[in-house]
Image (cartoon, grey):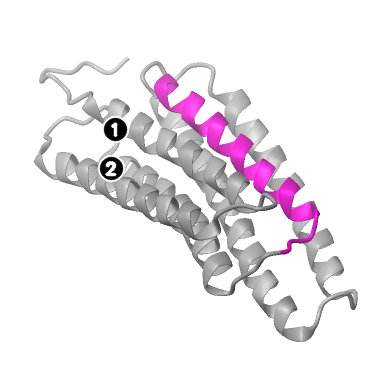
C-alpha cells in the first residue's frame, strides 16, 4: 500500500464513469440506427451530440490532469485511458455518420450481431469503471472484453465473406465495408480500453 503525504484528486473516477456511460448511450444509438424503419439522420445527429459529450469528458480529464499534483494512478495511464475511451466513441460516431452519408438502408443480418458486441462491451466497460476505485473484481471484465473482441473478429470475417459473395454491387460493397470496418475498429478500441485498465490494475496491486 502506497503512503500518500498529499491528498490525491479522486474526481477522475467520476469523470471516467461519465465517459464510459456515454459509450453505452452511443452503442444503443447504433442498435437503433440499423433497425428497420429508423430515422437514421436523427439518430446520427444524436450520435454527434454523444461524440461532442465524449470530447468534453476527455478534455475535462486532461484539464484536471494538468492541474493535479497527486493523481489516483499514474498520469500516463490516466491520459492513455481517456484517449482509448475517446477512440471508441470516434469509431462509433464515424460508423453512424457513414451510414447517413452513404444513404445505406439495407444491412447484412450479421451487422446486428456486430453492433450487439459493441453494446455489450460498452455495458461491461461502464460497469468496470467504478471498480477502478478499489482495483478489485476487474479481471473478469478484461477477460470478457477479450472474448467479445474475438467474437467480433469472427463476425467481421463472416460479414466480409458475405459482402464479397456476389449479392451486392461493387459500390454497395465499398459503402458497407467502410461501415463494418469502423465497427470492427470500435471493438478493437474497446479491447484497448480493457488492456489499459488491466495495466493500471496490475501496477496498483
On the picture, is 147 further left or further right than 179? right
Q: Quadrant of the C terminus?
A: top left
Callout 2–callout 1 Cβ contact below 8 Å: yes
On the picture, is 128 further left or further right than 32? left
**Whether residue 11 is situated above or below residue 55 in the rendered picture:** above
User: Residue at point 35% right, 45% down?
Assistant: 82
Of 195 and 59, which appears nearest the observer? 59
Coordinates of residue 62 in the picture (x, y in percent):
21, 46
User: Residue at point 69% right, 79% down?
Assistant: 174
**Whether residue 99 is situated above or below residue 50 in the rendered picture:** below
Q: Quadrant of the N terminus?
A: top left
Coordinates of residue 169 in the picture (x, y in percent):
80, 83
Q: What main secondary structure does the magenta stretch of the protein show?
A: helix
On the question of residue 205 being in view, the answer is no
Q: Mark 2 — residue?
A: 57
Q: Secondary structure at mark 1?
A: helix
Could you classify mark 1 by the number of other residues whose Cα lies within 10 Å: few (under 14), some (14-19), or many (20 or more)? Answer: some
- Which corner quadrant of the image does residue 111 belong to? bottom right
- The magenta stretch is 106-131
Marked residue nearer the N-terminal end (2 or 1): 1
Of 168 and 145, which appears nearest the observer? 168
Q: Is residue 121 magenta?
A: yes
Of 200 and 158, which appears nearest the observer? 158
- Which corner quadrant of the image does residue 141 belong to? top right
User: Residue at point 18% right, 18% down?
Assistant: 4
Coordinates of residue 158 in the picture (x, y in percent):
84, 60
User: Residue at point 62% right, 71% down?
Assistant: 178
On the picture, is 142 further left or further right than 116? left
- Which corner quadrant of the image does residue 177 belong to? bottom right
Compute the Cα span from label 2 to label 1. Answer: 7 Å
Q: Mark 1 — residue?
A: 15
Amino acid at each position: 500500500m502506497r503512503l500518500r503525504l498529499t491528498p490525491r484528486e479522486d474526481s477522475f473516477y467520476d469523470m471516467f464513469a461519465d465517459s464510459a456511460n456515454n459509450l453505452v448511450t452511443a452503442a444503443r444509438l447504433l442498435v437503433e440506427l440499423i433497425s428497420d424503419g429508423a430515422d437514421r439522420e436523427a439518430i446520427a445527429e444524436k450520435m454527434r451530440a454523444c461524440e461532442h459529450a465524449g470530447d468534453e469528458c476527455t478534455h475535462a480529464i486532461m484539464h484536471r490532469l494538468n492541474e493535479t499534483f497527486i493523481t489516483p494512478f499514474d498520469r500516463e495511464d490516466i491520459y492513455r485511458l481517456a484517449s482509448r475511451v475517446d477512440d471508441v466513441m470516434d469509431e462509433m460516431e464515424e460508423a453512424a455518420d457513414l451510414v447517413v452519408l452513404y444513404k445505406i438502408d439495407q444491412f447484412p443480418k450479421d451487422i446486428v450481431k456486430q453492433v450487439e458486441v459493441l453494446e455489450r462491451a460498452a455495458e461491461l466497460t461502464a460497469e468496470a469503471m467504478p471498480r477502478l476505485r478499489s482495483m478489485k473484481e476487474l479481471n473478469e471484465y478484461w477477460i470478457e472484453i477479450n472474448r467479445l473482441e474475438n467474437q467480433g473478429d469472427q463476425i467481421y470475417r463472416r460479414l466480409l465473406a458475405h459482402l464479397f459473395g456476389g449479392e451486392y454491387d461493387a459500390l454497395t460493397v465499398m459503402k458497407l465495408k467502410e461501415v463494418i470496418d469502423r465497427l470492427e475498429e470500435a471493438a478493437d478500441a474497446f479491447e484497448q480500453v480493457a488492456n489499459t485498465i488491466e495495466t493500471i490494475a496490475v501496477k496498483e496491486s
